[in-house]
Image: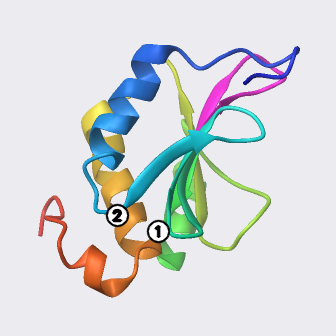
């Protein structure tokens, strides 16, 4: 469900994100207050949504040193105002979906219980 002033995330993008996170043990897709989120247990792994400014964003989790690094990299990354380990990324036609898949995999491994995270092959590992 989208709020009246927020655009719906293109279905193709939701499907691409779900192709990564839906393959993770016990990671469930569900509607969020706006957009779509993926959770493992009670922990949010990623949240994709359209903003009131008509820009699409995704937030996910990272290690604390990564959060600072991504913040300093600038666009398309940004630091979220909530949570110390939240990384944000603007999604558009130039999004590097392979890189995003790696970041989402890392986010899942941060948020999931250790016994589930151990079942996931991490890119570059």
Q: For the point 11% across and 70% down, which residue is it?
A: 125
The answer to whether residue 96 is seen in the rendering is: no
Numbered circle sitting on residue 116: none
Q: Position of residue 80 (x, y in %)?
A: 71, 55
Quadrant showing the N terminus: top right
Q: For the point 51% across and 69% down, which residue is it?
A: 41
Q: Position of residue 73 (x, y in %)?
A: 52, 50
- Above or below, 99 against 72 in this view is above
Q: Which one is in front, 90 or 35?
A: 35
Q: Which one is in front, 75 or 43?
A: 43
Q: Decide: marks 1, 2 in contact (CB < 8 A)?
A: yes
Q: Residues within 10 Å of mark 1 (few under 14, many from 20)?
A: some
Considering the numbered disc 2 on the image, is that residue within a helix, a strand or a loop? helix
Q: Which residues are magenta?
A: 48-58
Q: For the point 31% across and 57% down, which residue is it?
A: 105
52 drawn magenta? yes
Q: Residue beneath label 2, please?
A: 106
Q: Which one is in front, 36 or 62?
A: 36
Q: Give the side of residue 115 with respect to residue 54, left or right.
A: left
Q: Position of residue 109 (x, y in %)?
A: 35, 71
């Amino acid at each position: 469900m989208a709020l009246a002033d927020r655009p719906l995330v293109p279905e193709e993008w939701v499907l691409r994100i779900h192709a990564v996170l839906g393959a993770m043990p016990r990671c469930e897709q569900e509607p969020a207050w706006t957009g779509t989120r993926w959770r493992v247990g009670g922990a949010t792994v990623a949240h994709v949504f359209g903003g009131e400014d008509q820009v699409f964003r995704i937030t996910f989790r990272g290690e604390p040193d990564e959060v600072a690094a991504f913040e300093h990299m600038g666009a398309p990354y940004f630091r979220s105002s909530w949570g110390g380990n939240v990384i944000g990324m603007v999604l558009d036609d130039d999004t590097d979906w392979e890189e995003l898949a790696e970041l989402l995999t890392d986010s899942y491994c941060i948020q999931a219980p250790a016994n589930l995270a151990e079942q996931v092959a991490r890119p570059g590992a």
